[in-house]
């Protein structure tokens, strides 16, 4: 022949009919990066019945005259490929092999161990309550809920909204002290003033209507919480220069008082019964409306603590505290450490000191500086801010509340004085719901 397509010699042509899934499976085509055929694409060798639903083939000579005495392997005289060369027995693969059995046995063993360890606990009896029982609080020395503010979006409005939620969580008939503490890490004087105005509102809630002061307190703060729960940082946060009048009315408690006067237990009393509460709400409203996010720093190296108790200590278990630990100006170039080093403010603790002396000792603080000898082998040097940030503030609150509740006036005179306490943290940017 004058021209030829392909290599000279025997040629086999196989036709294979496949279904769509096999045609799209790239693993069927040898060295293929694509799913489908491409020119010159190599395919996996026979048998073809592992992928073809029908197969047939022809054979012959390419680019040379056919010689009758020249035979082609696997080619029949009629020019068809012997079918035995195209198909064969396909071994069936089972998952009954050693690795699979080992994997299943490990799963079953792990499940059996978990059953043995966990299931008996379902049937072992233990004391628990499906609902709140006031007697449970008798097993605690106090319940402490702490809200921490630290600047940024955490200003007066954020603190008031957060404190409303904490106070509204007062359990009914609580048999231990329910302590609400506001810890101000920003060390801002106006935050303390605003907290005092809030405490005056709580103290001014009247005791009438056949209910106790605590019942009226819980009723008022629950509605107050409902009035303020939808407030967001963009309406009360640190970027707000002046509160919207509707937000201000809800935040200070004025709308709460207007609504609660319509309740059965409150509506039958005249205006004179609410005069003290109205005056306290007006004072809080005035404080929130004046210089809303303008603050004056407290004395940097001084701790500020303030306590609140109800006019009648036996009328409710609620106690409130404001704490703001010292925040001295420290050189940012100094390494922040939890021990006393150059640039650190510290105080000294003598060997005979007691927890009651803690705040007094902190007042006599100094900054460690270069070239000033301070060798003291008797007293222990303690950093004024052993831990920075809100975590250190929470430690300060824990220490302070422990000391406060060990005072004689807060003693129960029973085994409850040695009971454990419950500690909860209320993030300043959120609000507890009653």
Image: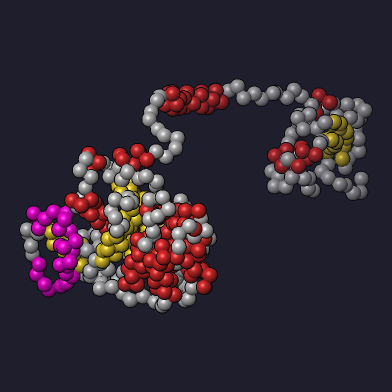
Identity of the residue drawn at 60% across and 22% down: 96
Left or right of 402 on screen, residue 19: right
Is residue 414 depicted above or below 385 in this figure?
above
| Residue 242 in view of the camera | yes
Where the N terminus falls, by quadrant? Answer: top right
Is residue 248 depicted above or below 350 in this figure?
below
Identity of the residue drawn at 91% across and 48% down: 2
Horizontal and vertical percent position of residue 23: 78, 40
| Residue 333 in view of the camera | no
Left or right of 147 on screen, residue 30: right
Left or right of 104 on screen, residue 148: left
Horizontal and vertical percent position of residue 37: 78, 45
- The boundaries of the magenta stretch are 350-374
Identity of the residue drawn at 34% across and 55% down: 180
Q: Is residue 361 magenta?
A: yes
Q: Residue 386 versus residue 309: which sits nearer the camera?
A: 309
Q: How many marks?
A: 0
Q: Residue 312 versus residue 65: which sits nearer the camera?
A: 312
Horizontal and vertical percent position of residue 174: 35, 45
Identity of the residue drawn at 35% across and 38% down: 135
Q: Residue 89 versus residue 289: which sits nearer the camera?
A: 289
Q: Is residue 125 magenta?
A: no
Coloring applied to the structure: secondary structure
Q: Residue 177 versus residue 162: which sits nearer the camera?
A: 177
Horizontal and vertical percent position of residue 87: 79, 26
């Amino acid at each position: 022949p004058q021209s030829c397509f392909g290599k000279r010699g025997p040629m086999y042509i196989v036709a294979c009919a496949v279904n769509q899934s096999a045609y799209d499976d790239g693993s069927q085509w040898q060295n293929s990066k694509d799913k489908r055929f491409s020119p010159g694409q190599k395919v996996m060798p026979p048998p073809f019945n592992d992928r073809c639903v029908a197969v047939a083939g022809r054979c012959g000579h390419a680019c040379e005259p056919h010689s009758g005495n020249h035979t082609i392997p696997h080619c029949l005289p009629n020019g068809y490929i012997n079918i035995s060369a195209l198909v064969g027995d396909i071994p069936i693969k089972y998952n009954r092999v050693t690795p699979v059995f080992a994997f299943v046995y490990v799963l079953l063993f792990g499940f059996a161990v978990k059953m043995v360890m966990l299931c008996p606990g379902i049937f072992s009896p233990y004391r628990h309550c499906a609902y709140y029982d006031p007697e449970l609080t008798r097993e605690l020395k106090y319940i402490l809920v702490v809200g921490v503010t630290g600047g940024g979006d955490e200003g007066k409005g954020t603190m008031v909204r957060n404190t409303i939620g904490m106070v509204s969580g007062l359990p009914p008939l609580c048999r231990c002290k329910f302590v609400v503490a506001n810890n101000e890490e920003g060390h801002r004087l106006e935050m303390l003033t605003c907290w005092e105005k809030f405490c005056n509102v709580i103290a001014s809630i009247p005791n009438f209507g056949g209910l106790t002061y605590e019942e009226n307190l819980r009723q008022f703060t629950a509605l107050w919480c409902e009035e303020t729960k939808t407030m967001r940082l963009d309406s009360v946060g640190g970027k707000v220069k002046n509160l919207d009048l509707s937000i201000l009315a809800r935040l200070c408690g004025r709308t709460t008082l207007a609504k609660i006067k319509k309740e059965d237990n409150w509506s039958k009393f005249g205006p004179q019964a609410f005069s003290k509460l109205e005056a306290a709400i007006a004072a809080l409203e005035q404080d929130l409306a004046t210089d809303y996010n303008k603050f004056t720093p407290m004395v940097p190296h001084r701790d500020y603590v303030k306590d609140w108790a109800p006019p009648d200590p036996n009328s409710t278990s609620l106690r409130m505290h404001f704490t703001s630990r010292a925040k001295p100006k420290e050189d940012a170039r100094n390494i922040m450490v939890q021990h006393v080093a150059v640039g650190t403010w510290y105080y000294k603790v003598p060997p005979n000191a007691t927890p009651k002396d803690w705040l007094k000792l902190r007042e006599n603080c100094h900054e460690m500086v270069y070239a000033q000898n301070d060798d003291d082998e008797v007293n222990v040097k303690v950093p004024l801010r052993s831990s920075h940030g809100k975590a250190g503030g929470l430690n300060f609150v824990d220490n302070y509340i422990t000391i406060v509740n060990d005072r004689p006036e807060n003693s129960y005179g029973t085994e409850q004085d040695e009971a454990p306490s419950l500690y909860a943290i209320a993030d300043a940017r959120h609000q507890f719901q009653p």
